[in-house]
Amino acid sequence: MSSQTLQTGTGKHSGPTTGTPATRKPYRNRRLPAAGTVGRYAALAVAAALTLGPVMWTLSTSLRTPSESFNLPPSFLPINPDFTAYQEVFKQINVSLLVLNSALVTGLIALGQMASATLAGYAFARLDFRGKKAIFSLVLATMMVPVQVTIVPVFMLIRGMGLSDTLLALILPAIPTAFGTFLMRQYFLGLPNDFAEAAALDGAGPWRIFRSVYVPLAVPGMAIVGILAFNFHWNEFFRPLILTISEQNFTLPLGLVTLQGNLGTGSISVVLAGVILSMLPALVVFIFGQRTLREGLTAGASK
Amino acid sequence: MTTTSTVPRQSVKPPAARRSFVERWLAMFFLAPTLLGMALFTFLPIIGSLVLAFFRWDIISAPQFVGFANFASLAQDPTVRVSFLNTIVFVIVAVVLQLGIALSLASMLQARMPSWLRVFLRSTFFFPLVLSAASVSIFMRYMFNEQFGVVNWLLSLVGIPAVPWLTSPAASAAVVVLVYVWQNFGFSFLLFLGALTNIPKELHEAANLDGATGWKQFSNVTLPLISPTVLVASVMAIISALQVFDQPYVLTNGGPGDSTRTAVMVIFESAFQQLEFGEASAIGLVLTVLILAVTALQFRLSRRFVFYQ
């Protein structure tokens, strides 16, 4: 299962580059930083700077006035923040509508996935029925099929259902989730049996056992499914690009790419202000749900 | 994992037969949303793709059966051929870079360091994963701008003349790789970090005592121990790189020429710009076969090379 309890503490595995084999503890204090250690910290510092640099540049440039936003030298720290670009981006595009669309699409997909994956995951983990293994393999197999392959028929299906250019066109096909079902099944398998037995003794039927005993216990698993869905679909670009046509149905990433296309390189800071705004929810997830997200992302690899 | 479905769960029973009858019905209801949804939005479309690949259809006129013509035109159409070639080169370079960076950083994080620093670095390397590839490509496109981009400005500080990042074929292909790797190395990093942290430290101590340190210890002790993760991380990285779309679409729109056009971009263009839905389906099927081949290879390789404890 998710083996994600990372020891952040003082794990004393000497790393591969620490060149002091079997040094005994008492000498630790007077050991000078070895060349390997210096090199390692330098490499980590460069990697961290290269990772954060572009984001810092985006933030600081969005806080410059539109007219000087492409002037050199660039800025990496938001000194003297100027919020003109943020006012401007609301005039250029309907930011609130984009946010509303993105929130509706992402929220409903997340809720739909949590509900359907909980039900299906429970059935695969704790209910008996014929053909269970075969059906479960079939569900897992859908993970192998990339969205680009099914997008043409899905596009036609959506047209046939009269849902072209609606938000439902984005929501409905995204609700059945093989990965979410897999996660919830694992989660339910990890919960003990005793509760079900005790509840059955009290005369609870299969539905009551599910509803009153296991659903409350599965909330952390559902949170993983919800956060993963949120992170993926909030940032999604390919399906909205194809399945929505009019600007009133655009989601944030699509609206921003269109804005960039319209403004070109005219006023960078306006586009970047939009980019920063679109990052805020992801930032919230990152700050408050990072652990959950990490567990979810790595769960698929450690089965 | 263990499949505990058949262990004696209902030792305490109201009439057992009735109970399993209720359970079967409940299971059907529980599975209905997922299975019906998948039937409609995954299985039906797969069949649709398989059929469509043998037709020429532009939505307006009636579909026309053309046999293998769509596949044959794939082999001949220079744009399609170049795009597949681009995709394969992209996958190789991006995956090697991504895994190399991820593994180096993850092993550097195993060394002794203050825990706040480790947490900070882990969060930092993870951060790009929560951003949207489209947004990242938007700001990266500005950063790689030839005249006022910050990348060329930094290079000018060390005396390197301006590079036409987005307008020369080789440089724009490099930009797509860099932007993609920048955003995705964190995922492989997390996998490696988890695997490295799970290695019992006695093994490293034993290796130290035997005089195996540095690279020797890494290649003879660490790498075999994390080989299952290396394999999984490679396969996941390859599969996701094969589907690259957002970055080249926003950064270069496939250009200059066809130099950054990828397989998925061609699917998108032939379906939704040229209205060649049959051809798009055929390209999609070829891509799926590639992905399935990579997955099959994973199982093969894992039997031969991976060391399971």
Image (tube, coloured by chain):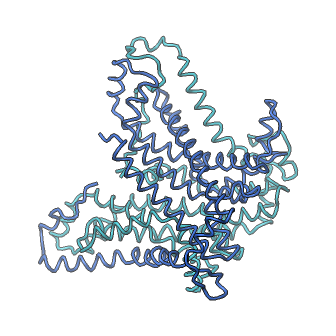
- Between B127 and B153, the one lying in front of the other is B153
Quadrant where the N terminus of chain B is found in the figure: bottom left
Question: Color used for chain A?
Answer: cyan
Please indicate, yes or no, whether residue B124 appears anywhere in the rendered image: no
Above or below, B138 relative to A119? above
The residue depicted at 17 percent of the width and 65 percent of the height is: B9
- Between A53 and B192, the one lying in front of the other is B192
Please indicate, yes or no, whether residue A131 appears anywhere in the rendered image: yes
- Between B297 and A282, the one lying in front of the other is B297
Residue B81 image offset from top left, x and y in percent: 64, 60
User: Residue furthest toward the right?
Assistant: A67
Residue B300 image offset from top left, x and y in percent: 37, 50
Looking at the image, how many numbered discs can be counted on the residues? 0
The residue depicted at 74 percent of the width and 57 percent of the height is: B255
Indicate the chain coloured blue by its letter. Answer: B
- Between B54 and B61, the one lying in front of the other is B54
Residue B159 image offset from top left, x and y in percent: 82, 30
